[in-house]
Image (cartoon, rainbow, N blue to C red):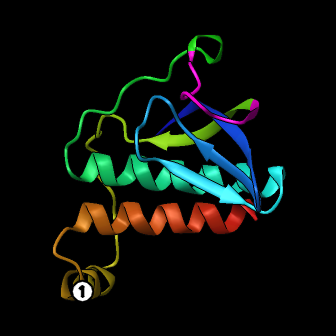
Amino acid sequence: MATVYYPAIVERGPEGFGVYFPDLPGCVSAGATAQEAVENAEEALNGHLAVSAEHGDLIPDPSDIADIVAEEGSEEAFRTLVRGERASRAVRVQVTIDEGLLARIDRVASNRSGFLADAARAALAARAL
């Protein structure tokens, strides 16, 4: 995974704040407070990037924050950069694993590499807390 920072526009709404990404149409988030909206935007961005990668969609590189343009009629409160993880080039590795554990993985997963990568992401996320 490669860490990227996409510019986002945070706008004030009648019941909180909304966030949208000019580079990624359809990727939006919201929250009761500005901080909550930006925190939720990171989750929305990562979900958007993951689904786009799964479908083989072209994912544009992030624009410079100074170059993005707010949508017409936007009640822009501020701009921010939101961190996301974008799939990068796959690298082939050789690992040693217990034969019984490998058999258990094969019973539940159709793709060993994907299963191990998902398990590694979950373990890393748990350690980040």
Q: Nearer the viewer, residue 31 or 104?
A: 31
Q: Position of residue 26 (x, y in %)?
A: 41, 46
Is 113 placed left or right of 26 in the picture?
A: left
Residue type at mark 1: give it: Val
Query: Residue 100 falls in which quadrant of the image?
Result: bottom left
Mark 1, Cα crowd under 10 Å, few <14 / some 14-19 / many 20+, is few
52 above or below 14?
A: above
Q: Tell me which segment is drawn in magenta.
A: 68-78
Q: Nearer the viewer, residue 93 or 114?
A: 114
Q: Farthest residue in the left direction?
A: 110
Which residue occupies 36% across, 36% down? 88
Q: Position of residue 4 (x, y in %)?
A: 54, 31
Q: Position of residue 78 (x, y in %)?
A: 78, 31
Main SS, magenta residues:
loop
Which residue occupies 62% across, 39% down? 83
Is 94 placed left or right of 6 in the picture?
A: left
Q: Position of residue 14 (x, y in %)?
A: 76, 57
72 falls in the magenta region: yes
In the picture, the quarter occupied by the N terminus is: top left
Q: Farthest residue in the top direction?
A: 67
51 above or below 96?
A: above
In the picture, the quarter occupied by the C terminus is: bottom right
Which residue occupies 52% across, 48% down? 45
Q: Farthest residue in the front direction?
A: 73
Is 80 placed left or right of 22 in the picture?
A: right
18 falls in the magenta region: no
Q: Secondary structure at mark 1?
A: helix
Q: Nearer the viewer, residue 59 or 34?
A: 34
According to the picture, the residue beneath numbered tag 1 turns out to be 108
Query: Residue 97 falls in which quadrant of the image?
Result: bottom left
Total marks placed: 1
Q: Nearer the viewer, residue 96 or 81?
A: 81
